[in-house]
Amino acid sequence: MVDKMHAYAGKILRVNLSSEKITIEPITKYTTRFLGGRGINQWILYNEVKPGIWPFDPANRLVFGTGVLVGTPAPGACRYTVDSKNVYTGGVGSANSGGHFGPELKFAGYDHVVIQGRSRKPCYLWIDDDKVEVKNAEHLWGKTTWETDDLIREELKDDDIQLADIGPAGENLVRAACIINNGARAAGRCGLGAVMGSKNLKAIAVRGTGAIEVAEPQRFMKLAEELLEKINNAPRMDFFKPYGTMTVAQHDNDNWSGCPVRNFQDGYWEKSKNMRCEDLVKRFSKRSLGCFSCPISCSHWLSIPAGEFKGVSGEGFDTNTINNFGYKLNINSWPAIIKAHVLCSQYGLDVDNTAGSIAWAMECYQRGILTKEDTDGLELEWGNYKAVLELIKKIAMREGVGNLLAEGSKRASDKIGRGSQKYAMHIKEQDLYETLRYRKGWALGVIVSPRGGGHLRGAPAFEGNVSPGEAEKYYGVRTAADRKAYEGKAKIVTWMENFKAVLDSVGICSLLSWWKSPHLIGPEDVASLLEAATGRHVDVQEIMKIGERIHNVEKAINVRVGMKRKDDSPPDRFFKEPIKSGPGKGDILERDKFEKMLDEYYELRGWDKRTGLPTRSTLEGLGLKEVADELEKYGKIAESAKER
Amino acid sequence: MVDKMHAYAGKILRVNLSSEKITIEPITKYTTRFLGGRGINQWILYNEVKPGIWPFDPANRLVFGTGVLVGTPAPGACRYTVDSKNVYTGGVGSANSGGHFGPELKFAGYDHVVIQGRSRKPCYLWIDDDKVEVKNAEHLWGKTTWETDDLIREELKDDDIQLADIGPAGENLVRAACIINNGARAAGRCGLGAVMGSKNLKAIAVRGTGAIEVAEPQRFMKLAEELLEKINNAPRMDFFKPYGTMTVAQHDNDNWSGCPVRNFQDGYWEKSKNMRCEDLVKRFSKRSLGCFSCPISCSHWLSIPAGEFKGVSGEGFDTNTINNFGYKLNINSWPAIIKAHVLCSQYGLDVDNTAGSIAWAMECYQRGILTKEDTDGLELEWGNYKAVLELIKKIAMREGVGNLLAEGSKRASDKIGRGSQKYAMHIKEQDLYETLRYRKGWALGVIVSPRGGGHLRGAPAFEGNVSPGEAEKYYGVRTAADRKAYEGKAKIVTWMENFKAVLDSVGICSLLSWWKSPHLIGPEDVASLLEAATGRHVDVQEIMKIGERIHNVEKAINVRVGMKRKDDSPPDRFFKEPIKSGPGKGDILERDKFEKMLDEYYELRGWDKRTGLPTRSTLEGLGLKEVADELEKYGKIAESAKER
C-alpha cells in the first residue's frame, strides 16, 4: 500500500535488466528545469545516452514518464511518454500514449521508469506499488499484446493491472514496432517497441494503490471543474465527442485535398464518400471509450457484426488509421480497416510507420520497381486489403518481403535501389503520413519535428480552421487563418512546439489543448493547475520557457548525432508534384518560400540558419550552459561550427 | 558426404535466423573481382547493409568467409575472416582467425556463411556437410566458450566438429566481445561476438568431409613444397618458430620504448626484464600448437604447474596479450597474464579491446577521476592483477563498473565526462593497443586502418627491422629501414593494405607473408598458387589491384556512414606527450609531419586530401563505378562533396 504523495514528489524507478539491479531516485533534482514526463525523460537521455550508443545497444535507455498532473482530476491528465533513441533517426525517439497505464504507474508511486541494459532472457517487469520484480517471460515470447495482457493478468491474479507491452513486432526488432497499452493505445512512433524488444522486455505490468495529493485541493478541484465546463461548452464538441479526430481525414480531403492519397501521389480520394466516420460509428461502435480523467471519451469499442471480418472487435482509432489505410493505401472498406488496425494492435505495430512502408511498396509495384517476384506473390494493387493484411503479418514476423518492409521505406529503398528511393516518403528516415502541400505551417511543424516527422509537435491543427479575427485574437498571427500563407507560420510552430513540450511533461492530452480551438486547455490553465498542485508559484512565461528548454535539449540530442539543416527537409515530391485533383488541385510546397519560412523558424529559435545548429547564447539563455559546452566539444554549436 | 570441389567453386550458405530460411548461392559471381574471403564478405556487406543499419539491427549481416586457398596444402592457408558492422565505429567491422574452423567450413562445401536476421531464441547453426540446421541453444546460453564446445560436441556425438562461438560477453552485447574457435583462437576486433549475440546465435558447428580439388595438382604441390622450404630456411625462424610474435613486445620495449606502457603514458617498462617469452615457454609450455597447414606452429599449450593459478591451462597468445596485460596494465606475472588470457577466451572477449577499457579506467583511477566508489571498491592500481581479473569478469557480465567498461573507453569516457575523454586511447572509437610514437609508417598504418585501429592492415612490421639495402631491394623504399622517417612510409602502408586484402581473401596467415621478412610468401607466390589452384592465368598486378579494390570498398563503407579525414587521426597524446623513458625517450609523433604523410597516403590512394573522400576516377579505375555512383548520391564522393 502506497500512501498519498505530493504531485511533485514522485520517484524515478531505475531497472538495469543486465544486472537486475533495481534502484529508486528522487525526481526533485529535475522538476524545476524540466517539470516531469517527457522533459525529464529527455534530460535523462541527454545525459546518459551519448552519441555512439545505437538504439538496440544495451546502453540505450528506454524511459517511461507520466507527467506532473497525471493521476489528478485535471481533465485529460492521463498520458505517459516513452523516450529513447529513435530506431529510424538515431536521434530523438519519443512517443506518447493515453489510456490508464500512466495514472496507474503514478498511483504506484513512480513518475518515471528508466529501463537500461538487456535481460539475458525474455522478461517482464512487475511493479506492485513498492514491490518491483523482473519476472520470466519466456512463455510470453511470441504472443500478441492481447494474449500477453490476458496471460499476465491471469498469472498475477489481478484483472485491474495496467500493462504496456510489445507484440511479436517488437520482439523481432521491426522498426515500426510500438508499445501498446489497454490493447489498442499506442506509444507509436520512433520504433520504441523494438527498443523494448532489444532489451528482451516483453511488458511492464503495474498495480498502484496510492493516490496523488495536491497542495491546494480545493483550488485544484475548482480549476478542474472550470476546465471541464469550458471543454464541454467548447465549439464543435458535437463532432469531437462522438468522432474524435476521425473527422479530420474526410474534412481535409473534401475541403483541401489534404490526404496522403496513394503514397502522396495525390491529396484527394474520390472514394472517400464511402468512408465517412459517421457511418463507421453507426455501423460498428458498441460503446464510446475514454482515457483516465477525460471528459471527451473520443474513442470507441468497435465490433464487426457480419461479413468477411465478422467477429473482429477492438478499440478504435484516430485519424491516423483512416488516413493510412484508407486514403494512403486506398482501402475502401471499414471492416478491412478495422481488421488492419486490430492486427497492428495485436502485433504491436505503429499504423503510421507500417502503412508508410506498405505505401512505398505499393507505389513501387505500381511503377514496376517491385513485381510479384519480390512480394512473395502478393499483388500490391492500391486498395488490395487482403494483401495489406498479409503484409502487416509479414512485417511483424519479418517473413519474406515483410523482412524488407520491417526496415521502413527509407532503408528498404536504400537496400533495393532501382530508383525506389524517391518513393520513400520519410522525414529524418521515419515514415510519414502527414501530407505537406495543403497547409504551410502544418508542413513546417511536421518537417522540423525532432522525432522525425509526425504532426504532434509543432504542426498547428487549427491552421486554416479559424477566421482571420480569431487567428489574430488567439494566436497573434492573422495568417493562421490562411492555410496557404507561409508568413507568420514559423511563430505558430515555435509556440506549439514549446507548449507541446509542457503538455507532455505534465501529462495532459494534447487533443484537449490545441485541437482546432483556443477554448480548451491553454498555458494559463496549465500554470494554474501546476500552482494548485504543487503549492509553488508558477508563471506562464516560466513554463513556456521550460517547454523551450526541453525542445532545445531534443535539438541538442539530434545535432549531437550529426543532424543539420539538411535534415529539416521533406521528400522532394512535395516540392515537385502538385496535388492532382479535388479542391486543392495544384497545391504544392514552394521550395523558396519553404526555405524562407525555415529561416524564420531558426531565427525565432535562436539557432544558426546556415547549419541549423543551436547557438551558445540561446542555450545559455535557457540555462543550458552544460549543453552548449558539450556541443562545442563535439563541434556541433553554431559559433564554433568547424564542421567536425 | 561432399565430393571434392574446385577451389573456385565454393558455395555461399545464407541463413536467415528470423525466418530460419536457408539458401545456397554460387560464389562465382564474385570471385573475379573480389577473390574470396574478406573480399567477398565486404562486397556482400557493401551491397546488403546500407547506412542506417546499426550493428545490432537484425538487418545487419555477419559474414564468415574462408578464402580461395583455404583447405589446400598451401602453407598457412587456414584463416577465416568475419565481417560485419563494427560495433565501435559503425563502419567496417572485420576480424580474422586461424585454427581449424575455416578449413572445416571449406571441407563442408562452403566458402562463406552469411548470417542475417535474428533468432527468436538462442540457437546454434549446425553445418554437417550439406545438411544445415538451426538448433536450439537455450541450454547453452550463459555458458563459456569452452563449455559450449564440450556440450555441442557431446550433443552431436562428434569430437571432430569445429566450432566458432561466443561466450557470455557476446550474449551480453559487450563491445569487446569476440568470436572464439578452437578454445583460444579469436576473430577478435570490432566486437563481432556482440553482433553474433545480437542475433541470438551462440555458435556455428561444422563438420566437413569433402576435400579441395585444385586445377593443377602437381604444380600446386610443387609450389607448396617450395614455399615450405623457403619458409623453413627464412631468417629468424629460430625465434619465430618457438615464440611466434611473443618476442615483439620485449624487442620493441628494449630497443625502441615501443610498448603501450600504462595506457601509453610511456613506451618503456622497466619491469619487462622479468617478462621474457623464453621464460614463459620454458616454464609453462606443454607443447607447441599450430593451425591447419602451418609449417611454423607458433602457438603453445600452456599450463601453470603451481602457485596461485595452479591448474590453469589453455592455448597461448601472440604479442597482443603480453602488450595488453603486461606492458599496458603493468601486470608483472606470467601466471596472472595466462589467467587473464584464459578468462578472455572463456568469456569470449578480445584482449585488445578489453585491456583498452581497463587501461583507461586505471589511468582515470591514477588521476583521481575514478575512485573506489566508481569501481565497486576495486583498487585499480597499475599491475593489480586481482582487480584486472575481476574486471574481465565484470565486463563480460556487465556487472557494476563492468557495465560501463563494456562500452569501450571512448563511450565510457563520454558517459562519465570529468575530463576522462583524453585518456580514452582509441581510433575511430575502437580501443587501441598499438603505440604510435616509435615507428612512423606503423603509426600511419594503424591510424588509417578502416576497421578502427589495429596493426593488421597496413602497419609494416618490418619497418626499422631491415637494413637500408634490404629496404631498397625488397620494398623499393630505402627509409623502410628508418623507423623515425616519415618519408616513403605512405607507399609502404598502401602496398601493405592492398596485399593484406589479398591474403585475407585467399585465407593465408599474414604472419607467413610479411612478418619482418621478404623471404616468406609474397604476391608472386600467391599468384602462382592461385593459378595452379584455379587453372586460370593470374597476374600479380591483377591480384594487387583486387586488393586495392577491396580496400576501396571498405573505404566506401566507412565514408558512407560519415567518416572523413578527421577520423584518420590518433589520440592527441601521441602528438603531445613524448616517450618518457628508455631508449626511445623523447620520441613523439609530430603533427605536421604526420599530416603530410597522411596527405601522401591519400594521394597514393587517389582520394581527396582535404576531405579524405574517394574520387570517382579512382573508383572507376578499379571497376567500382557503381560505388562511385552511390557515394555521389550520398554526397560522399570527392568531386561532388557538397558535404551533405
Image (cartoon, coloured by chain):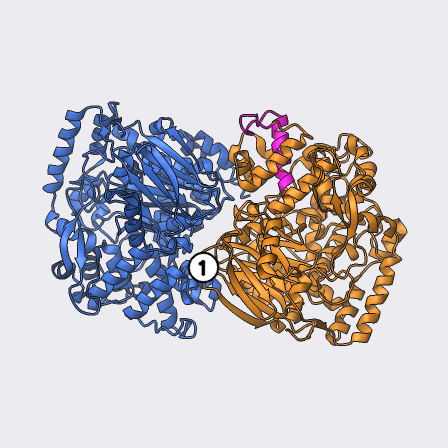
Chain colours: A orange, B blue
Q: Which residue is mark 1?
A: B411
Q: Secondary structure at mark 1?
A: helix
The total number of labels drawn is 1
Q: Determine if the magenta segment contains residue A355.
A: yes
Instruction: Estimate how packed mark 1 is, as few (under 14), some (14 to 19) or many (20 or more) residues with alpha carbons within 10 Å.
Output: many
Q: Quadrant of the N terminus of chain B?
A: top left
- Asked if residue B114 lies left or right of residue A291, the reply is left
Q: Residue at x 42, y 43 (%)?
A: B609
Residue A568 position (above or below residue B310)? above
- Is any atom of residue B436 visible in this view? no
Q: Quadrant of the C terminus of chain B?
A: top right
- Is any atom of residue B252 visible in this view? yes
**Chain for disc number 1:** B
Q: Which of the 4 image quadrants contains residue B208?
A: top left
Q: Residue A3 appears at what percent x and percent y?
A: 66, 75
Q: Residue B500 appears at what percent x and percent y?
A: 29, 40
Q: Which of the 4 image quadrants contains residue B66?
A: top left
Q: Which residues are magenta?
A: A354-378
